[in-house]
Image (cartoon, rainbow, N blue to C red):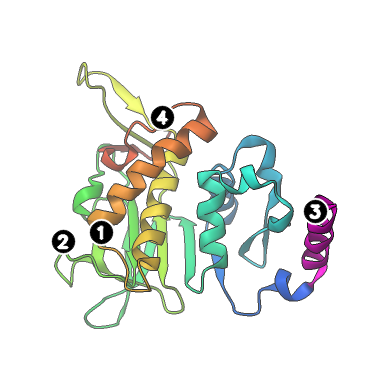
């Protein structure tokens, strides 16, 4: 009896277009090379449920989030995407060679080319050769205010992540001659989690970068077990990148 009642409520909610079309403009937008951006977001979801994520007019949505089984809603990748989709904050994810934002001091639009050379990635320093740009309205207090890694997102967004197409790696612990690839979805999850954590924060204040990074690492392990069947090898410390691979 209880189960039937719950199902009928769900059907009612799902058929209600007000819930589906999201009048508050809460959204996760894809940009850059759109099909690659979508592919990256879909890769955060366990295989069987990947067709549940759809994109309409550049906005990412679950076809029918309310009807997903509760255990699926708990998957780290699903929970992260739903947080970003349903939040009052506006997010953008783009696979791109260019990261667009605004200078935090001057408010002027900025565009920075992302890394094109091997071993150019140093995520912790957010240096100009980085293959990633992770921008939030919440300032990084570990970087100077005018540093490009501390740019604001483009107008209309609270958080934005840009990642160049390619493969992340780092030297093997046993030998510098061996290079270990990271599953790209570990990097995507890490950066999006970090961005959402910084941007959402506690009561809208935002978490500082280091805290958001640490939480991304901790949650990334569970994410990777669920989707890749193995723990995250610490994508937050990747220090190599190959744009051709
Ligand atoms: Zn990080």
Q: Nearer the viewer, residue 99 or 88?
A: 88
> Can you see residue 184?
no
Q: Nearer the viewer, mark 2 or mark 3?
A: 3
Q: Position of residue 60 (x, y in %)?
A: 61, 60
Q: Secondary structure at mark 4?
A: loop
Q: Residue visible at 58% across and 52% down?
A: 38
Q: Quadrant of the C terminus?
A: top left
Q: Which residues are magenta?
A: 1-16
Q: Is mark 2 within 8 Å of ligand 1?
A: no
Measure the C-alpha gap from mark 4 to mark 2.
28 Å
Pointer 2 with pointer 1, Cβ within 8 A: yes
Q: Nearer the viewer, residue 197 or 158?
A: 197
Pointer 4 with pointer 2, Cβ within 8 A: no
Disc 4 target residue: 231
Disc 1 target residue: 209
Q: Nearer the viewer, mark 4 or mark 2?
A: 4
Q: Position of residue 151 (x, y in %)?
A: 28, 70
Magenta stretch holds residue 14:
yes
Q: Nearer the viewer, residue 15 or 242?
A: 15
Mark before the other along the chain sequence, 4 or 3 = 3
Residue 116 lies left or right of residue 228; in this view the side is: left
Q: Residue visible at 74% across and 76% down?
A: 18
- Secondary structure character of the magenta stretch overall: helix
Disc 3 target residue: 2
Magenta stretch holds residue 4:
yes
What is the crowding at mark 3: few (fewer than 14 residues within 10 Å), some, or many (at least 20)?
few
Q: Nearer the viewer, residue 123 or 116?
A: 123
Marking on residue 142: 2
């Amino acid at each position: 009896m209880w189960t039937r009642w719950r199902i009928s409520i769900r059907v009612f909610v799902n058929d209600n277009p007000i819930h589906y079309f999201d009048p508050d403009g809460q959204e996760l937008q894809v940009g850059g090379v759109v099909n690659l951006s979508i592919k990256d977001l879909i890769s955060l979801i366990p295989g069987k449920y990947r067709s549940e994520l759809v994109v309409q007019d550049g906005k990412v949505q679950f076809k029918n989030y309310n009807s997903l089984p509760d255990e699926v809603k708990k998957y780290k990748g699903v929970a992260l995407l739903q947080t970003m989709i349903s939040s009052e904050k506006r997010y953008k994810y783009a696979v791109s060679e260019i990261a667009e934002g605004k200078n935090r001091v001057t408010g002027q639009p900025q565009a920075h080319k992302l890394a094109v050379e091997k071993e150019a990635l140093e995520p912790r320093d957010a240096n100009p050769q980085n293959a990633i740009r992770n921008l939030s309205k919440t300032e990084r207090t570990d970087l100077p205010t005018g540093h490009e890694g501390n740019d604001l997102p483009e107008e209309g967004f609270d958080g934005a992540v840009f990642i160049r197409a390619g493969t992340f790696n780092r030297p093997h612990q046993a030998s510098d001659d061996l290079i270990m690839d990271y599953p790209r979805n570990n990097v995507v999850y890490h950066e999006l989690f970090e961005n959402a954590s910084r941007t959402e924060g506690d009561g809208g204040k935002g978490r500082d970068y280091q805290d958001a990074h640490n939480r991304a690492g901790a949650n990334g392990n569970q994410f990777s077990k669920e989707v890749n069947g193995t723990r995250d090898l610490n994508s937050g410390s990747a220090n190599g990148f190959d744009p051709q691979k």
